Structure formats: structure tokens, C-alpha cells
Amino acid sequence: MDATLGEHRFNGTRKSWLAMVSTKRVILANGSRLLREMLHRAIDKADQLEVVQEIPDWEELPPALETFHPAWVIVTQSYSKHSHYRVDSCMEEFPSVRFIFLSPNQDNVKMKWQTSGEEEYSNLSLEDLIHILEKDLQPT
């Protein structure tokens, strides 16, 4: 810690102590490597968000949830019947995690949490998505 600046070196960058306290952890899951890397770079620029892991397949998701306790998991594929089963299983075990499904070939984003909460957005910008991730959302 640099006492004069009140900052820590954190994940290769300098973030203020306040930002570290309120940082929300994000896991980028599945989908194209290119899309995961683009999201990672965009999220890294947000003060209140930290990508803790990128995972290429579903089998790595449960251990990552247990290790990192993220606020969000961003899945870069549409919300299909196959992913529905896996996500519901993860939500039962980790009820505080929220899932966002980005559909790269469609213009919509679906958010799902605690098996009963769900919202859908369309025509979001990257800035809009970052704003959603940073907000303190309460389950409804």
C-alpha cells in the first residue's frame, strides 16, 4: 500500500481503496474468446468491476463460482434450454450470483438470478451494460 496515495497495487493496476471495497467480481463464461477479451478490456476500465476469471466451458463454472464468489457471470451465448439447466443448478448453489446472457447475433441481453428473477433488455450499448453491472440491484 502506498500510504501517501491511499492506493493498492491490485491485479496489475492501481485502484483506490474505496474502489476495491465496492468492487464487484465478474466471471466471463463460454462463448467466443474474442468477445470475452473485448468484454474483459471494457470491464477493466470500470472502477467498480473486476474480471476475476474467463472460462471457455461450463464445466469450469461451478469451481470458479466457489473460488471467486462473483456478483455477475456474463455468458456470451443465448439463453438456451441446455444452459437453462446448468444456470438453474448454479443459482441454487450460489443464489447471490446474477447471470447475464449476451446474444451476439441478436440485439438483446437477458439477466437471470435466483431462479425467479429475470429481465430482458434490447439495444444496449457497452456503456449501458457496464452501468447495469455497477448498480446495486436488489432481487425482486
Image (cartoon, rainbow, N blue to C red):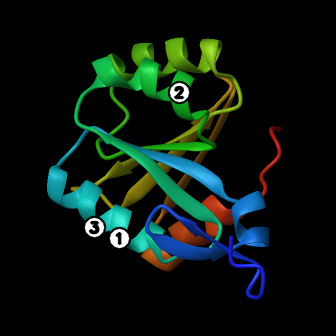
Res 2 → quadrant: bottom right
Residue drawn at x 68%, y 25% is 114
Q: Secondary structure at mark 1?
A: helix
The disc label shown at residue 67, or none = 2
Q: Is residue 125 visible?
A: no
Q: Nearer the viewer, residue 107 or 102?
A: 102
Amino acid identity at mark 1: Arg
- Disc 1: which residue: 41
Amino acid identity at mark 2: Thr
Residue 19 x, y percent position in the rendering? 72, 69
Which quadrant of the figure contains the N terminus? Answer: bottom right
Q: Is residue 15 above or below residue 138?
A: below
Q: Is residue 119 visible?
A: yes
Taking 101 as reference, is 30 left or right?
left
Residue 33 x, y percent position in the rendering? 17, 51
Give the residue at the far bottom of this rendering.
Answer: 4
- Disc 3: which residue: 38
Res 17 → quadrant: bottom right
- How crowded pointer 1 is (Cα within 10 Å; few <14, some 14-19, many 20+) is rated as few
Q: Nearer the viewer, residue 121 or 58?
A: 58
Q: Is residue 75 above or below residue 134?
A: above
Which quadrant of the figure contains the C terminus? Answer: top right
Tags 3 and 2 in contact by the CB under 8 Å rule? no
